[in-house]
């Protein structure tokens, strides 16, 4: 069987980003500019434009009412998720950085979404272990410490409703997976989780070539 995909380059990617519903959203553009000013090594933690739109459409289409995000950074993904929730929907954000999430809080307020979003600061694994008994979610987006992804998954999966969704970012690790055997601990952790999700009977999973790779999982 042949393969079917389109190799990406800067020209095609710029075209792709123009062809989305929120391409002219001034608030999202403002947040991207402020995050870029933090420097290349820091700002690369932000999700891509097309990922944000993808999250918004997915959350709205799935009728998500309760969502959780592990790794908020300056708030781009949380804005996209929270905007797509119904008026009484809730997004719980977990992050370890007070400095970066201060930017997120500012943009939540600008968007009028601060009442839909709750932020809990601290190590993600600790905060996940401390979640209230009986608290469940329709949707989870994971974009934090890569070696801890599997731990987040195991802590979150029991709290995701049947047919609920879990998405992991950076699952292609900058294109470093899929070739020669990997030795770096972060790459080995991501590769092991990709393989685990593909055979885990608790979920249905597909690895999508959106940005740096999104693992898209549905709880069975």
Image (cartoon, rainbow, N blue to C red):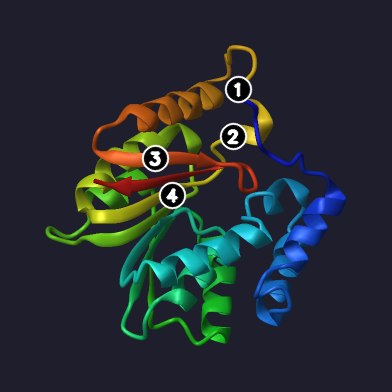
- Distance from label 3 to label 2 (Cα)? 15 Å
- Distance from label 4 to label 2 (Cα)? 13 Å
The residue depicted at 43 percent of the width and 49 percent of the height is 167
Question: Which mark is nearer the camera, 3 or 2?
Answer: 3
State yes or no: discs 4 and 2 in contact (Cβ < 8 Å).
no
Residue 142 % position (x, y): 44, 49
Category of crowding for the residue at label 4, using alpha-carbon neighbours closer than 10 angstroms: few (below 14), some (14–19), many (at least 20): many
Q: Can residue 74 be seen in this view?
A: no
Seen from the viewer's position, the closer of residues 180 and 42 is 180
State yes or no: discs 1 and 2 in contact (Cβ < 8 Å).
yes
* Element class at badge 3: strand
* Element class at badge 1: loop
Residue 4 % position (x, y): 66, 36
The numbered mark at residue 42 is: none
Read off the residue under disc 1: 178
Up-down relation of residue 179 to residue 156 (above or below): above
Q: Is 17 displayed left or right of 197 in the figure?
A: right
* Element class at badge 4: strand
State yes or no: discs 1 and 4 in contact (Cβ < 8 Å).
no
The numbered mark at residue 167 is: 4
Q: Is 115 displayed left or right of 212 in the figure?
A: left
Seen from the viewer's position, the closer of residues 154 and 40 is 154
- Distance from label 1 to label 2 (Cα)? 8 Å
Read off the residue under disc 3: 205
The numbered mark at residue 172 is: 2
Query: Which of the marked residues, 1 or 3, is nearer the chain's N terminus?
Result: 1
Q: In which quarter of the image is residue 26?
A: bottom right
The residue depicted at 29 percent of the width and 40 percent of the height is 203
- Distance from label 1 to label 3 (Cα)? 17 Å
């Amino acid at each position: 069987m042949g393969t079917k995909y389109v190799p990406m380059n800067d020209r095609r990617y710029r075209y792709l980003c123009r062809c989305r519903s929120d391409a002219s959203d001034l608030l999202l553009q403002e947040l991207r500019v402020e995050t870029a000013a933090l420097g290349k090594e820091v700002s690369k933690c932000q999700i891509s434009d097309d990922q944000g739109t993808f999250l918004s459409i997915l959350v709205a289409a799935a009728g998500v009412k309760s969502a959780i995000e592990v790794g908020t950074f300056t708030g781009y993904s949380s804005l996209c998720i929270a905007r797509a929730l119904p008026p009484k929907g809730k997004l719980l954000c977990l992050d370890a950085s007070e400095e970066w999430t201060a930017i997120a809080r500012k943009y939540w307020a600008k968007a009028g979404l601060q009442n839909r979003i709750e932020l809990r600061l601290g190590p993600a694994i600790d905060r996940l272990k401390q979640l209230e008994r009986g608290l469940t979610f329709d949707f989870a987006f994971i974009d934090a410490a890569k070696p801890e992804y599997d731990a987040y998954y195991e802590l979150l999966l029991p709290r995701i409703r049947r047919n609920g969704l879990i998405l992991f970012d950076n699952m292609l690790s900058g294109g470093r997976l899929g070739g020669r055997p990997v030795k770096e601990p972060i790459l080995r952790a991501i590769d092991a989780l990709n393989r685990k999700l593909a055979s885990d009977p608790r979920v249905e999973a597909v690895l999508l070539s959106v940005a740096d790779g999104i693992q898209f999982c549905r709880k069975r």
